[in-house]
Image (spheres, helix red, strand yellow):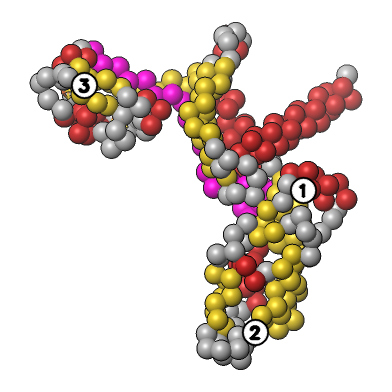
Amino acid sequence: MSEFSRDINVEVIEHSRDVLKIVLHNVPVKIANSIRRSVMSLVPTLAVDKVIIFKNDSIMNDDMLAHRLGLIPLRTSLDKIRELERNGGKVSLLLSIESKNDVTTVKSSDIVSRDKDVEVLSGDIDIVKLGKGESIELEMEAVVGRGREHAKWSPVTVSVVRGLPVIDIKDPNCGEKCDDCVDACPKGVLANQGGKLVVVDRYSCTVCKLCEKACPDNISVDIDESSSLLYIESVGQLSVDEIIKAAFEELYRKFSELYDAFKVMA
Ligand code: SF4
Ligand code: SF4
C-alpha cells in the first residue's frame, strides 16, 4: 500500500511525434511494466496479412515476398483502425509492376492503396529486384491486429521501462584530483565543473557501474525501482500520443473484463 500512498507525477524528458521519454515518479517499475507491455502488444495497428499472387517472375519465392510485404508499415488514423476492427474490415492494396528496361528495384512506393485513408508509411523500402521483362502482379489484404499475435502489428521499435539510476558521490569536490570516472562513463552522465564532480544527465545513466569501478571509494550507483523511466519509440504508423492513449484504453478494457468476471462470481 505504501507504494501508492505518495504523489504520482509525470516528468517529460523527451517528447516528439515518434519518441517519448518520461519519468513516472512514484510509479513502481512492476506497475509501469504493464504500460510497456500494453504499448508493445495490445495497441492495434494495420498490416498486410494475406497476399494473393497472380504473377511473380522475381528470384524471390512467393512465401518470402509475402512475408516482406507483411512487414511494410501502413499508416492510418487510430479512429480508422478502431472502425475497421469494429466492422471486421479489410483494406486492399495492389502491386503491379513490370521491368521494361534493365533491372528495376520494386519499392514500397509502387504499392497502391484502394483506401484513401491508408498508405504505406515510407515509399523508400526496397521489396525485390526485377530483371528486364520480369513482372509482379499481386493483391494484398491488410487487417487490424496486435503485436501479441505478430511483431508486424507492434506500433513501436522500442518500449522499455526501468528504475531510476541513483548516483551517490560522497565528496563532489574531488574533481581537482582526476577525471577518471568522467572518462569511464560512456553516456556523458558525469562532468568535472571546475573541480566539482556533477551529474549532468542522470536519466541517460545505464547503471553500467563503470564510474563506480573507476573510483569505488567515492562513487556508488544503484537503481530505485519505486519510480520508473519509460522510453517509447514509434515505428511511425501512430504517434506516441496515440500509442499511449490506446495502451491505456486496452488496459482499461482488460481490467473492466476482469472486474465483470468478479461481479459474476459475487
Ligand atoms: S569520483 Fe573519483 S574518479 Fe571521479 S573525479 Fe572524484 S576522485 Fe576522480
Ligand atoms: S553507471 Fe555507467 S552510465 Fe551511469 S554514470 Fe556510471 S559510468 Fe555513467
Q: Read off the residue under disc 2.
A: 98
Q: Residues within 10 Å of mark 2 (few under 14, many from 20)?
A: some
Q: For numbered disc 3, what is the local secondary structure? A: strand
Q: Are marks 3 and 2 in contact (CB under 8 Å)?
A: no
Task: Please report the bounds of the magenta region as a residue range.
Answer: 146-170
Please tell me which residue is depicted at 59% across the width and 64% down the height of the picture.
Answer: 123
**Foreground: 24 or 80?**
80
Q: Residues within 10 Å of mark 1 (few under 14, many from 20)?
A: some
Mark 1: amino acid: Ile
Q: Is residue 127 left or right of residue 115?
A: left
- What's the CA distance linking mark 3 and mark 2? 63 Å
Q: For numbered disc 1, what is the local secondary structure? A: helix
Mark 2: amino acid: Glu
Residue 131 place in picture, x, y as percent = 55, 87
Q: Are marks 1 and 2 in contact (CB under 8 Å)?
A: no
Q: Read off the residue under disc 3.
A: 193
